[in-house]
């Protein structure tokens, strides 16, 4: 019997030795960041010291390329110091149900950052190469994101008065595109073609990993005593990121004047294949007179959002230069594509207006492709507003299937505040279009008897009728309740 036990012991030691040779990193090299974070919580004598200790632990993990797991359900009350820089996240970060309570009286910051270890590489390409299925041998090797900027002005943003007259040039807008290149083949088309005389594209690329990066299980609370803005997370130049099981709460100052402009609690730039699921936002600093968003994205490709729940007075979700977004099972107060976007799909989503006498809508301009609503509810909400400020009225399709609409003030599917006669300088935007509308089984609720329901409503029409190409309205099954 003892002989068999000795043999088993010998075999077991050999197996463990061989496994250790094959997987030395997993068995022996991984640091115990969980214990270090637990100790930091015990040893830190102030909120400033705590965030400094957390930053050092994260920096060590980042430099070694190792994942971080926080101790389970701990509370970290931190204070932002004057010299604070964003904390670099590794590719795998599990906050493990911890709560971060943040006070900031110093400056606007992002608390965490997930950035690319590579740098941008300039590259010269021809216009005809900027489309799907093109072979780019110069980009052989690892997968890459190709960032395209059109150096020719895309459009201008204007302020209008109540009579539809321009009062101010607000912004000059440039378009960006993001192309994913795998094994030197371009995987997707840009939002709109570069195959015209107007574009002047410049290109850069960055190497990316296709392995999924994860950020999960965090509660983030911004204190009402803060006098400076703390944003949670900035993601840039990434491919395949999953953000899950996050809760964001802003304890608002009593006075609106003490809130902050340009809230962007989660900001994502120049990134593709972003997935958010089970993310809840309770309040942002935005209000009727203060703009800002819970989630802000610029130049993004193939993003999905499942069980995203945002409650805010004004700013919920905003993008510019976005190519293909899908929302499922979400509760939202706003989805904006301010300018230059293609293809948005919403399934089983509820769009809610939580403020009386404040007109809330999903906003679009220079949009292409399809805007699809399936099994969605609109609670005192306007499904589509074409943002007149950009003077960019492109043709696209609105498709609504099995939806319920309790109209807002506008009593319509699509509203255009001002249809201006001003001609856009950009060749591709010179012609003005209204979107095509296709409806299947739409229930319109609580429409006042003195009001008429319209597919389009144009508040101020200064254009000539013959300058607007005809649109398609295809309706089957609209009922009033």
Image (cartoon, rainbow, N blue to C red):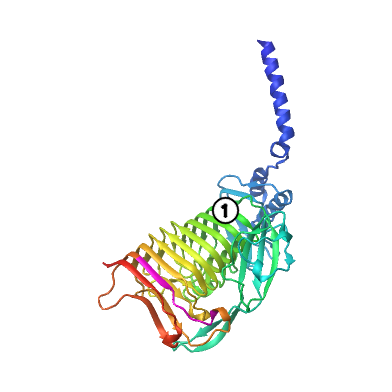
Decide: is 171 above or below 109.
below
Residue 402, image x and y in percent? 35, 61
Q: Residues within 10 Å of mark 1 (few under 14, many from 20)?
A: some
Q: Tell whether position 27 is magenta.
A: no
Is residue 428 visible to us here? yes
| Residue bearing mark 1 | 242
Q: Residue furthest top?
A: 1
Task: Give left or right: position of 290 versus 461.
Answer: right
Task: Give left or right: position of 100 versus 16.
Answer: left
Task: Give left or right: position of 86 versus 474.
Answer: right
Residue 433, image x and y in percent? 46, 78
The residue drawn where x is 55% and y is 47% is: 73
Question: Which sits in the foreground, 456 or 186?
Answer: 186
Question: Which sits in the foreground, 370 or 31?
Answer: 370
Is residue 113 visible to us here? no
Question: Which sits in the foreground, 231 or 166?
Answer: 166
Decide: is 74 above or below 289.
above
Dot 1 lies on which element?
strand
The residue drawn where x is 51% and y is 62% is: 325
Residue 453 is drawn in which quadrant?
Answer: bottom left
Residue 121 is drawn in which quadrant?
Answer: bottom right
Residue 130 is drawn in which quadrant?
Answer: bottom right
Residue 279, image x and y in percent? 50, 56
Q: Tell whether position 431 is magenta.
A: yes
Q: Which residues are magenta?
A: 429-439
Task: Give left or right: position of 148 versus 303.
Answer: right
Q: How many numbered marks does the figure carry?
A: 1
Residue 1, image x and y in percent? 65, 10
Question: Which sits in the foreground, 214 or 38?
Answer: 214
Decide: is 201 above or below 9.
below
- In the picture, the quarter occupied by the C terminus is bottom left
């Amino acid at each position: 019997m003892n002989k068999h036990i000795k043999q088993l012991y010998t075999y077991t030691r050999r197996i463990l030795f061989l496994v250790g040779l094959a997987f030395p990193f997993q068995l022996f090299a991984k640091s115990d960041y969980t214990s270090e974070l637990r100790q930091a919580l015990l040893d830190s004598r102030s909120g400033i010291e705590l965030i400094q200790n957390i930053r050092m632990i994260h920096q060590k993990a980042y430099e070694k390329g190792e994942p971080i797991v926080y101790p389970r359900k701990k509370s970290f009350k931190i204070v932002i110091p004057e010299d604070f820089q964003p904390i670099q996240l590794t590719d795998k970060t599990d906050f493990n149900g911890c709560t971060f309570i943040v006070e900031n009286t110093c400056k606007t910051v992002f608390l965490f950052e997930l950035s690319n270890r590579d740098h941008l590489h300039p590259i010269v390409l021809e216009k005809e190469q900027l489309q799907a299925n093109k072979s780019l041998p110069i980009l052989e090797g690892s997968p890459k994101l190709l960032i395209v900027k059109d150096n020719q002005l895309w459009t201008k943003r204007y302020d209008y008065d109540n009579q539809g007259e321009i009062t101010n040039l607000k912004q000059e807008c440039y378009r960006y595109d993001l192309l994913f290149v795998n094994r030197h083949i371009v995987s997707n088309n840009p939002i709109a073609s570069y195959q015209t005389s107007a574009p002047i594209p410049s290109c850069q690329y960055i190497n990316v990993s296709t392995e999924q990066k994860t950020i999960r299980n965090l509660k983030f609370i911004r204190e009402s005593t803060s006098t400076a803005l703390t944003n949670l997370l900035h993601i840039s130049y990434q491919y395949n990121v999953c953000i899950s099981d996050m809760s964001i709460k802003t304890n608002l100052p009593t006075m609106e004047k003490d809130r902050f402009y340009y809230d962007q609690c989660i900001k994502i730039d120049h990134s593709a294949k972003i997935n958010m699921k089970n993310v809840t936002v309770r309040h942002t600093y935005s209000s009727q007179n203060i703009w800002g968003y819970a989630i802000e994205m610029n130049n993004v490709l193939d993003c999905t959002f499942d069980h995203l729940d945002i409650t805010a007075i004004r700013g919920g979700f905003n993008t510019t230069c976005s190519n293909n977004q899908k929302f499922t099972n979400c509760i939202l107060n706003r989805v904006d594509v301010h300018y230059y976007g293609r293809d948005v799909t919403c399934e089983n989503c509820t769009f809610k207006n939580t403020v009386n006498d404040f007109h809330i809508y999903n906003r679009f301009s220079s949009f292409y492709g399809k805007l699809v609503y399936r099994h969605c509810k609109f609670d005192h909400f306007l499904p589509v507003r074409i943002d007149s400020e950009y003077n960019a009225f492109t043709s696209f399709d609105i498709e609504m299937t099995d939806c319920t609409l309790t109209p807002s003030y506008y009593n319509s599917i699509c509203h255009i505040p001002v249809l201006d006669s001003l001609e856009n300088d950009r060749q591709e935007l010179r012609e003005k279009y209204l979107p095509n509308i296709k409806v299947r089984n739409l229930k319109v609720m609580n429409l006042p008897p003195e009001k008429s329901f319209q597919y389009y409503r144009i508040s101020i029409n200064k254009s000539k009728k013959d300058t607007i190409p005809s649109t398609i309205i295809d309706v089957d099954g609209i009922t009033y309740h």
